[in-house]
Image: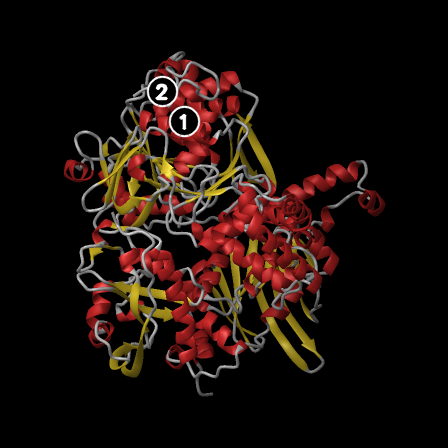
Amino acid sequence: MNERNFGEVILDLKGISLSFGAMRVLNNISFNVRQGEIRSIIGPNGAGKSSMLNVINGVYHPQEGEITFRGEVRKEMKVHEAAGFGIARTFQNIALFKGMSTLDNIMTGRNLKMKSSMLAQAIYWGKAQKEEIEHRKKVEEIIDFLEIQAIRKTPVGRLPYGMQKRVELGRALAAEPEILLLDEPMAGMNVEEKEDMSRFVLDINDEFGTTIVLIEHDMGVVMDISDRVVVLDYGRQLADGTPDVVRSNQDVIDAYLGVSH
Amino acid sequence: MSLPPNQPGGQNSEVLDTFPKLLLNHAKVRGDKIAMREKDLGIWQSWTWSEVADEVRALACGLAALGFKSGDKLAIIGDNRPRLYWAMAAAQCLGGVPVPLYQDSVAEEMIYVLDNADVRFAIVEDQEQVDKLLEVKEKAPKIEHILFDDPRGLRHYDYPFLSSIDKAQEQGRQYDEAHPGFFDQSALSGSGSDVGIMLYTSGTTGNPKGVVLTNDNVIITARNGIIREGLTENEEVLAYLPMAWVGDNLFSYAQSYVAGFTINCPESGATVLTDLREIGPTYYFAPPRVYENMLTQVMIRMEDASKIKQKMFHYFMDHAKSTGTRILDGKPVSLMDRLIYKLGNFFVYGPLRDVLGLGRIKLAYTAGEAIGPEIFDFYRSLGINIKQLYGQTEGMVFICVQPDGEVYADTVGTPAIDVEIKIDDNGEVLYRSPGVFHSYYKNPESTAKTKTDDGWVFTGDAGFFAENGHLKIIDRAKDVGKLNNGTLFAPKYIENKLKFFSFIKEVVAFGNERDYASVFINIDLEAVGNWAERRNLAYSGYTDLANQDTVYDMIQECVEQVNLDLSKDPLLSNSQIKRFLVLHKELDPDDGELTRTRKVRRNFIAERYGPLMGALYSDVAVQHVETQVKFEDGRTGVLTADVKVRNAKTFTPVKAAS
């Protein structure tokens, strides 16, 4: 692969701590995300990875720490702000509209970009018509990109799991995000599906310059496609750095291979 | 070689003897007519003939700017994309030769062909193919330049010899301006006897051979096909079969260039059935398995339909079976039957044809392997004019075609226009036609072995002419043997006839240098299992089921029906099956009984089951047998069984062999 250059830090998390009652799920976590990189968060089950993503897009509000997004320091993100600022995500458990077609599901990802009124959209009139055609074009480009033309009109509930994951990625892409948060995009997939998904993640990063924050269990995949990796374990931050650095970190090896305490 | 006078398009046919000339003529005569469509971003995009001519011109000039010269080979690798078809014409415009390759070949398989064909330039579809060629390039350094269609994922590929088709066309337009007259002069300078295209045949043994075809070979054969079937410029064809296959070159390129009809490129390999429905082609080719799959789909979906719909479907389909093919063949049908068929057409046949995407079909071909008569009749009874043809790359497809109104499931029809056929003493079919290939590329030995000095080509197939003048292909010539009484024995013909029964999965026929024909049979576990379930027959597994008397009874009926069929055939009536047995195990590639492509290895099986062979040619009723088997995890075991051997009824030949 060619030399990769990254832009500035667009998202900086400092000293993030999050508790639910007495449960401390994140403890003083600090890391940043640079423009255009593929940034992974790894760790065993219950390490706090999904909580971390939820902090980034504003679902959880940390008790301590600060978040700097595009140079603006704030204590917490708000969900609508995150979406408005171009942060899109997919979920660990697929969250699609099962009865709707692939096309319609991805179209819902365009929601924030639609400017015309609901009434105008409903009667498909005036500007709404032109707008819808443009949105449809964008959605078709995503369908083409993800190679899911054959399931364009299939209700999502009837698709196999791996395909549903792909549709969900498509919906997140439809928002033309600056940062894409992927929560275990390869969970439950076979080797071939994982390879496909890895290729799509790399292609999205490459073609659209989208910054990607990724949670993944499969170490092989993570080390292959990530630029930098942060490792969590029981809410603590174990390591942060390039795959090579992380791979040789003793704490990480202990956490993954197990060590007698 | 004379050209038929009534060339579609009404132009002076003497001049239009190359693809560039045909293209430029279309741009002039029917410039606004749609030549090509491709579904992109969910919408069918189209190009008229004059637009295609313009694109081809830009691409050809772009290639010329890169140093492509007359006589150079252009490898074309990818799915059916308009720009890859334009690449073929572009190469021909420069006096070059397109060499399409199978897009699913792995890099190592491509090395041989690219090296053998002396390919200097390649036009490929996408990153996948570029990656393969980069791998190949180290071992086949003759490749000098690679152009790609889809830039996705290729942004960071920094090689001086790699660029996009877009960029090449851009350069081509500048080159065209700087060299006025170059393109027209080059495009119009070719002649019919020049090499038009090279197609590699996937050799089952040894390396693939490059079949060199001249423009005359391709264009005259394409034109003859058009004339015989009455095709016009208004046909719609879906281009979905590999571009490296001679059939695609004929149906989706040559015939379109001759007649001026429209080629439609599907959105992706996975959407072909949807695209078929949207386009509704009028002219269609598919191998038998495609028709088979479509029929299975229909039947499965009918099982889920409501009772009323099922009743209606079965009633009208039964009626279609008895009258549909007769109407299609123009035979007399009573008024009442015609009325019921009309009604059925409204309620069942029409909607069904639409769902299949065959609503507008004027002509559908199938070839490649034997098609089950039931499948064949199903489509014909719906009013879809599906016909079998017999062809070869070496003859630019057309050797025999079934004429309208004379379609029989077990023949491949009568010789195509300008084709002569003869059968040699060994029963092998030879033909001579305007489509007969020039030579195998750089392989005079093979050429001499296949083609005689006066133009006859050995097909390697054994066959004969039935009384109605139709050619019947029975087997590969090398597999055909003789019974001890000297009459012809064609094992595959018998095997295929039995395999058309859904209960029978595999058959191995014996008879060469024996007194009579006999067979090993593998039942189809799923089909026979279902059948047994409906009869409350208990069984523990394949071996048990295969050995049941009721199953033997049922298989015996199948065998005897085949015997009855064979008895009507003057040449093959002696090959009626006297004895048969149902094997106690399924034939398996892991045990070496089948090839990986599931062809039976007859001699190996005969040796392996020596005792059973002995039983077939004696009069024992039960034979004990022990067989070594290999399990999927690699362990071996021994399977013992007492296999029954039965006699089947044979019939007096209707006519003795003359």
CA–CA distance between discs 2 and 1?
Answer: 9 Å
Q: Would you say B535 lies left or right of A254 here?
A: right
Cβ–Cβ below 8 Å for labels 2 and 1? yes
For marks 2 and 1 on the same chain, the one whose residue lies earlier in the sequence: 2
Q: Quadrant of residue A47?
A: bottom right
Where's residue B159, x and y in %?
A: 35, 38
Where's residue B504, x and y in %?
A: 40, 66
Say which residue appears at 52% left-offset and 26% top-offset: B233
Say which of B393 and B81 sits in front.
B393
Say which residue appears at 54% left-offset and 63% top-offset: A162
> Tag 1: residue type?
Arg
The residue positioned farthest toward the bottom in the image shown: A261
Q: Are labels 2 and 1 assigned to the same chain?
A: yes
Circle number at residue B223: 1
The chain identifier of the residue carrying mark 2 reads B
Tag 2, which secondary structure? Answer: loop
The chain identifier of the residue carrying mark 1 reads B
Instruction: Judge whether B349 appears above or below B631 on screen.
Output: above
